[in-house]
Image (cartoon, rainbow, N blue to C red):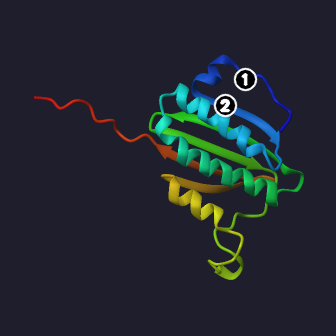
């Protein structure tokens, strides 16, 4: 990972954005950043699902994006969390292996993202795409009222 910038304090309250060139071990560092924000935002219950989904999106950049360059956005929302990974590879995402073969080696990562998040999607942008997911905070139950 490289090309770090110093985000403003206001951005740290609601989100985090940074560009990276990712490698085989980058997901570990990005999970730590995500975990720190979720703890700060009192959303620790989203950690497992969000870390797994982020790992899959970063792995896709490492495997499929020439130059392995991407931008990460971690955004606090009133309902929970949104994470976006943008790259400059116009190739669309695949959710299954070649010819729809569910047993193929590739293409299962986004099926996993779908399973552990509340929503996800991929949006083509000029010169690339943005793949995103959202995890919602579940309503907390308070003490019973009498």
| Residue projecting furthest to the right | 67
Q: Residue at x 67, y 50 (%)?
A: 55
Per the image, the residue denoted by label 1 is 7
| Residue projecting furthest to the left | 146
Question: SS for tag 2?
Answer: strand
Per the image, the residue denoted by label 2 is 16
Q: Residue at x 71, y 73 (%)?
A: 105
Answer above or below: position of 36 versus 118: above
Tell me which label, 1 or 2, sits earlier in the chain. Answer: 1
The local crowd at label 2, few if under 14, some if 14 to 19, many if 20 or more residues have their Cα within 10 Å, is some
- Residue 86's tag is none
Answer above or below: position of 133 versus 100: above
Tell me where residue 126 appears, x and y as whole percent: 78, 52
Question: SS for tag 1?
Answer: loop
Residue 134 left/right relative to 145: right
Q: Residue at x 73, y 47 (%)?
A: 86
Cα distance between the residues tagged 1 and 2: 7 Å
Choose between 91 and 45: the one closer to the eye: 45
State if disc 2 and disc 1 touch (CB < 8 Å): yes
């Amino acid at each position: 990972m490289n090309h770090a910038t110093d985000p403003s304090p206001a951005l740290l309250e609601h989100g985090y954005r940074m560009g990276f060139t990712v490698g085989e071990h980058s997901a570990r560092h990005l999970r730590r950043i995500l975990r720190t924000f979720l703890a700060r935002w009192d959303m620790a219950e989203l950690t497992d699902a969000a870390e797994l989904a982020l790992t899959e999106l970063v792995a896709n950049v490492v495997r499929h994006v020439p130059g392995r360059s991407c931008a990460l956005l971690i955004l606090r929302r009133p309902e929970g969390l949104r994470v976006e990974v943008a790259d400059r590879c116009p190739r669309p995402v695949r959710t299954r292996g070649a010819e729809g073969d569910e047993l193929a080696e590739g293409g299962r990562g986004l099926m996993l993202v779908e399973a552990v998040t509340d929503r996800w999607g991929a949006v083509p942008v000029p010169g690339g795409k943005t793949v995103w997911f959202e995890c919602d905070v579940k309503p907390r139950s308070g003490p019973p009222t009498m």
